[in-house]
Image: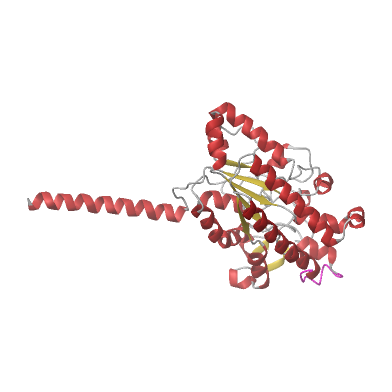
Amino acid sequence: MDFKLSKLVQQQLLIFFLSSTIAESQLINGSRESPVSAIFAFGDSTVDTGNNNYIATPVKSNFPPYGRDFFTHIPTGRFTNGKLITDFVASYLGIKEELPPYLDWSLGVDELMTGVSFGSAGSGLDLITAKISAVIPVLDQLDYFRNYMDRLDQMIGMNKREDLIKRAVFVLSAGTNDFISYSTVPLTREVFSVEGYQGFLLDKVKEFIQVLYNLGANRIVVSGLPPMGCLPIVITLKSRDGIHDRGCISSFNSIALDYNLKLQAILQEYSSSTELQIFYVDSYKPLIDIITSPASYGFMISSEGCCGTGLVEAAVLCNLKSLVCLDASKYIFWDSIHPTEKAYFIIFNSFKPVIEHVLQSY
């Protein structure tokens, strides 16, 4: 009797040990049992995981030194040295380790069913922004999503596809390129004041959300603008002495803050008038915190990119002939526009409360 009881206890302890080990492993790796069926990303280079590789545009990053610190050490078309925030989110939810680009036609049904990115680097909510860079406008990315749904209908059937879309999370990250374009295109400034252009873009956000809602989306995460005036390229081009004076351009940051407040108000209004659940993520505060206190996060360089001089290099200007810093983890920015993987990871960590809020909505 005692022997049998001892064996039972041993078995229970073994089960407990194995369960604890598995749970600990899942916690470390960020995986979990997730109610989220898939993640779909729309927008600009902050979510483009390689779609621009497949279109005729000079705005590409599928060559070294991009991707230097990606786990494969192979350039993917991501505008950074490693992963993007959407990759970290997918991994955190236990869905997949990275979010692939939709235009990669080698993707199988399993990859398609768990989510893809429709983002296009250089794009914006304004059609003119996308035309300047010959990339896919944000609203046109919805056409690719419709095509995605048609493909999935053929693969798994309409009913399963509708359920997948219902349980998916949609992410929109766009607007920075629009305001940079606005500052450089005289015709746009003749048509719109800054406030007028903000309203124009916000109308595009509402249009985007309405289309997704009509297509069956239940949960949409919308990112606010980052501190645009702190991007190395903006500092270089917009300060009186872009080489020696490397302080953030306050006027650009003010535009971003004002836009973000208006965006939140619109999202709140839209969410309260529909059954759609909309979540806002603040991209401004975590990045400005890093930039103003870099040493607190282990960074040494905050106003220059790791690639080349760090002042203007991005896309084709950041290439094999460029001098590249030895340790990107000391830099907030990888090139003159885009954060490093480490900076993206810190920003992702600041998003976790919102991610948990999304999970609680199921």
Question: Is 187 colored magenta in this rendering?
Answer: no
Residue 231 visible to an observer of this rendering: no
Q: Position of residue 72 (x, y in %)?
A: 57, 45
Q: Position of residue 169 (x, y in %)?
A: 58, 47
The residue drawn where x is 79% and y is 68% is 249
As drawn, the residue found furthest toward the top would be 154
Q: Which quadrant of the figure has residue 53?
A: top right
Q: Position of residue 116 (x, y in %)?
A: 61, 41
Residue 94 visible to an observer of this rendering: yes
Question: Is 245 colored magenta in this rendering?
Answer: yes
Colouring convention used in this rendered image of the protein: secondary structure
Residue nearest the observer in this picture, 199 or 34: 199
Residue nearest the observer in this picture, 329 or 19: 19
The residue drawn where x is 55% and y is 61% is 349
Name the dominant secondary structure of the magenta segment. loop
As drawn, the residue found furthest toward the left would be 1
The residue drawn where x is 66% and y is 61% is 283
As drawn, the residue found furthest toward the front would be 273
- Which range is magenta? 240-249
How many numbered tags mark residues here?
0
The residue drawn where x is 75% and y is 65% is 258
